[in-house]
Image (tube, rainbow, N blue to C red):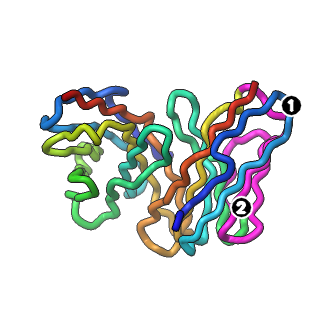
Amino acid sequence: AQSVTQLGSHVSVSEGALVLLRCNYSSSVPPYLFWYVQYPNQGLQLLLKYTSAATLVKGINGFEAEFKKSETSFHLTKPSAHMSDAAEYFCAVSERRNTGFQKLVFGTGTRLLVSP
Amino acid sequence: DTAVSQTPKYLVTQMGNDKSIKCEQNLGHDTMYWYKQDSKKFLKIMFSYNNKELIINETVPNRFSPKSPDKAHLNLHINSLELGDSAVYFCASSLRDRGSYEQYFGPGTRLTVT
């Protein structure tokens, strides 16, 4: 069964600093990987996804993530944090199934705090 | 032009009551999901329907019964509500044949059982 581990329930950065949110996955088959963001009292919004094309994936709002098979990682980065980036971030994995049906398994989330 | 909508947004009720949450998507997707997010923000899938057919049914109590009248709607009915059912419930949808399987989420329904 697939799973994801997000290291650090909280990450604090200063505005303008590098953002690094860690995600490691476990999957018995090649995975699809996703990062979602949840702003307070809102639903989840897709930031970016890895689906076996380029290993460096660019998403919305200046975020990107790199798929590293050897490290089973899919860390999320942004060169310069903005106050509006403060939110909860979820990494998720989905097995590729021949049936076409997928089941997303989420990590426990990382709250990003951005200070002025 | 809301993509995935849920009603109600907030639901406060007493133990033992029966309640329903409705979900609609206008994205033309054929697969819909229900997720539960607990107080620690942990998200877990509950059910998934494809073209009105149940395809994923996680270990959810029988008190929870999803219903999909058509592929654009997925409702969740909960019988005999318990304190532990308090959570935020998210509906999501995707297109099976898209190839990337990304899911689009609704705004959530915060259920509080007192």
Type of the residue with mark 2: Leu
Quarter in which the C terminus of chain B is drawn: top right
**Identity of the residue drawn at 82% across and 28% down:** B15
Along the polypeptide, which appears first: circle 2 or circle 1? Answer: 1
Q: Is residue A37 above or below residue A5?
A: below
Instruction: Report x, y in % for residue A83.
Output: 25, 37
Q: Is residue B15 left or right of residue A67?
A: right
Magenta-drawn segment: B54-83
**Identity of the residue drawn at 26% across and 51% down:** A69
Tell me the residue that label 1 is attached to. Answer: B16
User: Which chain is mark 2 on?
Assistant: B
Inter-mark Cα distance, 2 to 1: 26 Å
Instruction: Report x, y in % for residue B96.
Output: 53, 70
Numbered disc in front, either 2 or 1: 1
User: Which chain is mark 1 on?
Assistant: B
Instruction: Report x, y in % for residue B104.
Output: 49, 59
Type of the residue with mark 1: Gly
| Residue B70 on the magenta span | yes
User: Label 1's element?
Assistant: loop
**How many C-alpha atoms fall within 10 Å of the one at disc 1: few (<14), some, or many (≥20)?**
some
Q: Is residue B55 above or below residue A114?
A: below
Tell me the residue that label 2 is attached to. Answer: B54
Instruction: Report x, y in % for residue A55.
Output: 22, 59
